[in-house]
Image: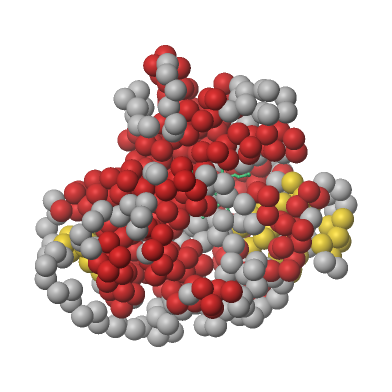
Amino acid sequence: MFHDSDFLPFTPREKPSFLAVTRNYLENYPPAAYRSDYFVSEGLWPLVPRIHYVTGPELIEEALVARAEDFRRDDLTSNALSGPIDRETLFFADGAEWKWQRRAIAPAFRHETLLALTPDFAACARAQAEDWRELTDGAVVDVMAAMSHTTFAVIEKAVFGASEAFDGEGFVAALRPVLGGVAWRLLVAMFGLPANRTPYPGFLAARRGARFLRAETEKLLAARRASGGERRDILGLLLSAKDPESGRTMTDAELIANLHGLLLAGHETAAVALAWTLWLLAKDQDSQQRVREEVARVCGDEEIGPQTVEKLAFTRQVLLEAMRLFPPAAVIGRQPRADTTLGAHRIAKTEPIYALVWCLHRHENLWDEPNGFDPDRFAPEKAKARHRYAYLPFGAGPRICVGMSFALLEMTTIVATLLREFRVETVPGHRLQLAPALTTRPNGALPLRVTRLSRNAPVRQAERHTVSH
Ligand code: HEM
């Protein structure tokens, strides 16, 4: 178990604050949220609806799994996110529309299809390693930016088979103001105002960014149509997807929305998870060393590929533990289709329910030393002993993340490829601040020192530099 005061880099507030909504909304979950299973923000602020917060696994299971049909995506999140994410996507679709889109997309995420992508994941990780090789030893790198770059390259390859028609760098740059506006959009949405039409700081830049992203995605679709031929990447599968019942195919609007959605959901979440993983391993050098030794034992000098990636069990445990402490999606929203109850709590159909993954993952009744970093929590026998819904980085039930296996294979390959060659270390004096919005991002950069290891040299015995609370 490794402790560091940065692992909970803020003090939960007894009373919520407006400022915290745009700076770090996680602060607004009170200390009791880490001990109980439910609280309600009754009469929080005038005009803001009553919000039900669920922090225990039984109630979360009821809303997301057992009674999934009784709940839809909540209006507040839909208002805040429809802009950054298109309304026509799988993410927002509901009822029969959702079922057909999910069926259409699912074949692209079959296990064998994904395993066959591991060489692509490894190639993108190697390209990142090549960039790092150019640096002098001990150079400071912003791993948040680096991982965005790497996961974008992965998703670009997997979705489009990479295309000349696409301005990937421009796409990532245009995303910044779009993502940067999400915290403000959440605040605007809390007051029932339309987030697509209500000005907030950075509104115009976010709108320009969103337009550019859409135009780029349209260009891509047009280029693929013009090139003809069938390809087995995700775009190819979407283009040929047909509903077996009605025979319908995706409209252009649905294709563009889903491509855009996959580009965004598929790279931002994984980038955040990878950045936190490297940062946690920079703190906990023992675990970093264990990853390196595992990669050497399982893969030798071979590239990580379909035969080896699933044998990197400890590397995967590290990723799971990193997503426990810093879940890329910290909150999952729902709203009942009609007035209802959840457990013993009455919920009107106008009121959102938020499953607080952040609090669930640090719940004092579910986890020993919840703010410590310990990848061994995810050793199979320990994981089995826990409540099935105590850990939900990808959600649960029918709307569970469609890209879960993709992300796990991708991230395992990337961590293993980078750490077999480089040591990452913390930068003295860096103080972590969170700025969660669409994902649980750090505020600004996440700097780490990167040093290339000589392939044949014995890896330095890791030193433990524990900072206790
Ligand atoms: C570490 C990486 C990732 C995390 C933590 C993550 C997390 C999540 C979560 C929490 C949800 C919402 C579940 C709900 O509302 O109940 C979701 C949905 C979704 N994710 Fe992911 N995701 C990741 C990677 C990916 C990737 C790589 C892709 C695609 C390539 C992807 C595509 C989607 C889509 C399309 C949905 C909507 C599914 C639906 O509503 O049916 N995600 N993800």
Q: Within the image, what quadrant is residue 3 found in?
A: bottom left
Seen at 61% across and 56% down, the residue is: 395
Q: Is residue 143 left or right of residue 258?
A: left
Q: In the image, is residue 32 above or below residue 186?
A: below
Q: In the image, is residue 290 above or below residue 47?
A: below
Residue 205 position in % (x across, y down): 45, 35
Q: Is residue 163 visible?
A: yes
Which residue is at the far front? 307
Of residues 412 and 364, the one drawn nearer to the viewer in this rendering: 412
Q: Within the image, what quadrant is residue 189 found in?
A: top right
Q: Is residue 335 left or right of residue 217?
A: right
Residue 4 position in % (x across, y down): 40, 78
Split into 4 quadrants, where in the image is the C terminus?
bottom left
Residue 221 position in % (x across, y down): 46, 22
Seen at 58% across and 28% down, the residue is: 241
Q: In the image, is residue 461 above or below residue 126?
A: below
Q: Is residue 443 visible?
A: no
Seen at 55% across and 33% down, the residue is: 258
Of residues 227 and 173, the one drawn nearer to the viewer in this rendering: 227
Seen at 71% across and 56% down, the residue is: 64
Split into 4 quadrants, where in the image is the N terminus?
bottom left
Which residue is at the far top? 226
Residue 77 position in % (x across, y down): 65, 47
Q: In the image, is residue 333 above or below residue 391?
A: above
Q: Within the image, what quadrant is residue 295 found in?
A: bottom left
The mark total stands at 0
Give the image's coloring scheme. secondary structure
